[in-house]
Amino acid sequence: MAVHRDCHVCFECGLYSVPCALVGKRLWLRATDSVVTVHQDFQPAAIHASSSRPGERRTLIDHLPPEAQAFFAHDRT
């Protein structure tokens, strides 16, 4: 599976983040009932709890590019 521009991969209608440096790369995924692990070259690139409903995003802020991290760190008030 390929990493989308938004730093996520799709598996069984759930979206899971991976480090932004992997955008466009082909990775493989291993899933159990409770955990989804995304691998690059047999090394885990990201580990997430399985999504519980379709369309749910599991995102780690550290996986996003620096400008997106700054946006989410900004206080709305």
Image: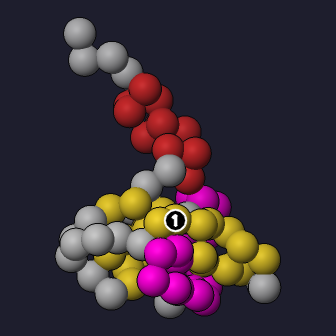
- Residue 65 visible? The answer is no
The local secondary structure at tag 1 comes to strand
Residue at screen point 43% across, 55% down? 59
Residue 71 spot, x, y in % from top left: 38, 31
Residue 63 spot, x, y in % from top left: 56, 53
- Judged left or right of residue 46, residue 36 is left
State yes or no: residue 5 in magenta.
no
Q: Amino acid at mark 1?
A: His
Which segment is the magenta one? Answer: 19-36
Residue at screen point 29% across, 71% down? 52
Residue sticking out furthest to the top: 77
- Residue 75 visible? The answer is yes
Can you tell which quarter of the image residue 4 is in? Answer: bottom left
Residue sticking out furthest to the front: 33
Is 73 above or below relative to 14? above
Residue at screen point 23% across, 10% down? 77
Can you tell which quarter of the image residue 8 is in? Answer: bottom left
Is 28 above or below relative to 39? below
Is 66 above or below relative to 77? below
Packing grade of label 1 (10 A; few <14, some 14-19, many >=20) is some
Number of labels in the image equals 1
Residue at screen point 47% across, 66% down? 49
State yes or no: residue 31 in magenta.
yes
- The residue to which callout 1 is attached is 48
Can you tell which quarter of the image residue 9 is in? Answer: bottom left
Residue 22 spot, x, y in % from top left: 61, 69
Q: How is the image coloured?
A: secondary structure
